[in-house]
Image: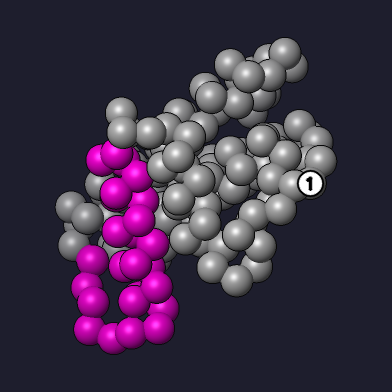
Amino acid sequence: MIKEEKISRESVDKVIVKAHRGIKSAIILVEDNDLEGGYELSYEAMLLAGRALVFSFNFRPRTIGSHKTVVEFVEKVFGKEDGVLAAKFNKMRKNRHYLIYGSGLAISQTEAKNAIISARVLLEKVEKNIQERSPQGKLEL
């Protein structure tokens, strides 16, 4: 479900920056009581962080099933230690899918705020993992 591809650190950094912007936007939406929009953007920030992690290993997920592939890659890299975070990521993936393609799912204020927290935590872990493996140092935001 993934293929090898040389991906530059600059490209990885751009995806990280986009994930940070997504979290900022999610906060604004939740503060404006757009809970579903904030939840979706939090998930998208997690997805971007996960994709940055995949890219940092010089892989790219294939198009079909790419969201699930990214979740599984994050699980493999972070292992059992961060199993709860990976489980949240996977649950958010399923909820986001239902928000877009289903009907009747409502996101609470608590779920929306927890989604933002989870997105921040995952993004921090991804950045740390990339920095520890890269001689290029910390990303400038």
Which residue is at 39% across, 73% downward?
97
Q: Main secondary structure of the magenta part?
A: helix
> Would you say residue 124 is visible in this rendering?
yes
Picture quarter with the N terminus = bottom right
**Image coloring type:** one colour
Residue 73 is situated, as x and y percent measured from the top left of the image, at 50, 46
> Was residue 96 drawn as part of the magenta stretch in this picture?
yes
> Was residue 48 drawn as part of the magenta stretch in this picture?
no
Which residue is at 61% across, 43% downward?
54
Query: In the image, is residue 43 above or below residue 96?
Result: above
> Would you say residue 38 is visible in this rendering?
no
Residue 43 is situated, as x and y percent measured from the top left of the image, at 42, 56
Highlighted range, magenta: 83-107
**Count of labels shown?**
1
Residue 110 is situated, as x and y percent measured from the top left of the image, at 18, 52
Residue 12 picture quarter: top right
Which residue is at 59% across, 48% downward?
51
Residue 4 is situated, as x and y percent measured from the top left of the image, at 75, 47
Picture quarter with the C terminus = top right
Left or right: 128 as drawn, with respect to 40: right
Query: In the image, is residue 86 above or below residue 42?
Result: above
Q: Which residue is mark 1?
A: 5
Left or right: 69 as drawn, with respect to 122: right
Amino acid type indicated by mark 1: Glu
* Mark 1 crowdedness (10 Å alpha carbons): few <14, some 14-19, many ≥20: few
Query: In the image, is residue 41 above or below residue 96?
Result: above
> Which sits in the foreground, 32 or 1?
1
Left or right: 126 as drawn, with respect to 136: left
Residue 109 picture quarter: bottom left
- Element class at badge 1: loop
